[in-house]
Amino acid sequence: MWLILPLALACAAVLLVALPGRDREGDDTRAAACRPRTVASWSADDRSTGEFARYGDDPARADDWTGGDGTHSVRLPDGRVLWLFSDTFLGQVHAPPNPAGQPHPWRDANAPMVRNSALVMSRSGTLQRTLPAPLFADPGPQQWRWPVAARVEPRSPASRERVVRVLLWSRMTGQGPWIYGVPMATEVATLSLPDLRVEGIVKVSDQQRVADPEKRVLYGTTTVEDERWTYVFGGTDAQAASRPTSHAHVARVPHGRLAEAGAWEYWDGEGWGRESASRAVLGNGGHKGVGSAFTVVRDKGTYVLFTMAAGAEGLTDVTSYWACSPTGPWHGPAKAFEAPLPKDGAARQDTAAYNPQAHPALGGDGRVVLSYDVNWLDPVPASAQANVNRNVSLYRPRFVSLRLAEPR
């Protein structure tokens, strides 16, 4: 089931539509700096993609990260980068050819898999080590945690000490149509610096109080900041087979208070208030909507959202939208580009790209660096797992570098 879940999220990541509403604070300031933005050019970032291949394929590593999805990152104060993953393969990768005769690095069929992991990258961009995995323990029987967005912030608003806050999605095993897990809660973990030790985990949004799982919102697929606030995006989970699209929501938290549930405010369609009054900023519940896996960046006064395009052949096209406020209205979609997939020597090329995520730690000089995850499309979990073990490049992040500009 774990291999199919991200593909379900990708299928749900479709075209967006804005609902009425405005962020009434700072509208004039944002409007003055806001301009339409679209992808002007892009290219494969082979260096970043290759670094994860180098680390994962290293035969000297016997029980470290060899592949994963749900890719997120955060730059630490000392210049290192912390990389966070959801479902992760550990173990060891073997040199080609693999037992099926394919010319790909491969892993054993019984390679261990954990629900989350974290890697540390040096200031120079070299992956160095895997933290003890799983980094975030299961909250209970048949439950697990997936890390999503992370930020460095003061331990408290007035503190000079800094910590890492990691947003977590808590899920539990479910039956059809919730075969990929039922959304339970959004949590925030605090990691100490510089040793990256998990100090504690607090629940900021308990969705078990929402009776209908289709209406539960998990926050943290992406975050953006302005001068005062951290905006945290999330969405209804759309795991039910009968519902192909989701609604996107947004909350905001004062800087330094991500781990305080009482500090969170939720967009209610007209302003910011209680979670129970939260209203969607994107999606209509029909053929237009947003999946759980999307990302937002801020380019001066403009917010740009990246998601997989709807109706793309093979689930490979990434498109973008822009807005002058986190609450919208969102404009688009812009012309999509096709995310390159790894080459595979199998009889079928049933691979998909999903979960585009921005990585400011890798950007600069006006560039935006996006990662996207890659998986094997197969309705049978055992078959999908066999294929990503046969060719380990099928379950690792890949990267593109792009530049934004006003549409012509």
Image (tube, rainbow, N blue to C red):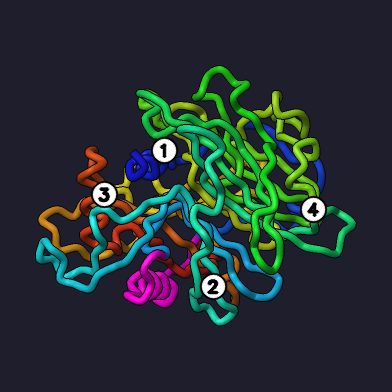
Q: How many marks?
A: 4
Q: Which residue is mark 4?
A: 256
Residue 41 is one of the magenta-drawn residues:
yes
Q: Nearer the viewer, residue 281 or 202?
A: 202
How far is disc 3 from disc 1 in space, using C-alphas?
22 Å
- Cβ atoms under marks 2 and 4 closer than 8 Å: no
Whether residue 257 is visible to the viewer of this picture, yes or no, is yes
| Residue range corresponding to the magenta coloring | 39-63
**Nearer-N-terminus badge (2/4):** 2
Mark 4 vs mark 1: give the one in front.
Answer: 4
- Cβ atoms under marks 3 and 2 closer than 8 Å: no
Of the residues shown, which amino acid type is indicated by label 3?
Gln
Q: Residues within 10 Å of mark 4 (few under 14, many from 20)?
A: many
How far is disc 2 from disc 4 in space, using C-alphas?
24 Å
**Nearer-N-terminus badge (3/1):** 1
Write down the quadrant of residue 335 in the picture.
Answer: bottom left
How far is disc 4 from disc 3 in space, using C-alphas?
40 Å
Whether 224 is drawn above or below 212: the answer is below
Q: Which residue is mark 3?
A: 385
Q: Which residue is mark 2?
A: 121
Mark 3 vs mark 1: give the one in front.
Answer: 3
Q: Which residue is mark 1?
A: 12
Residue located at (16% from left, 66% from top): 98
Find the residue positioned furthest to the top.
Answer: 211
**Nearer-N-terminus badge (4/1):** 1
Q: Residues within 10 Å of mark 3 (few under 14, many from 20)?
A: some
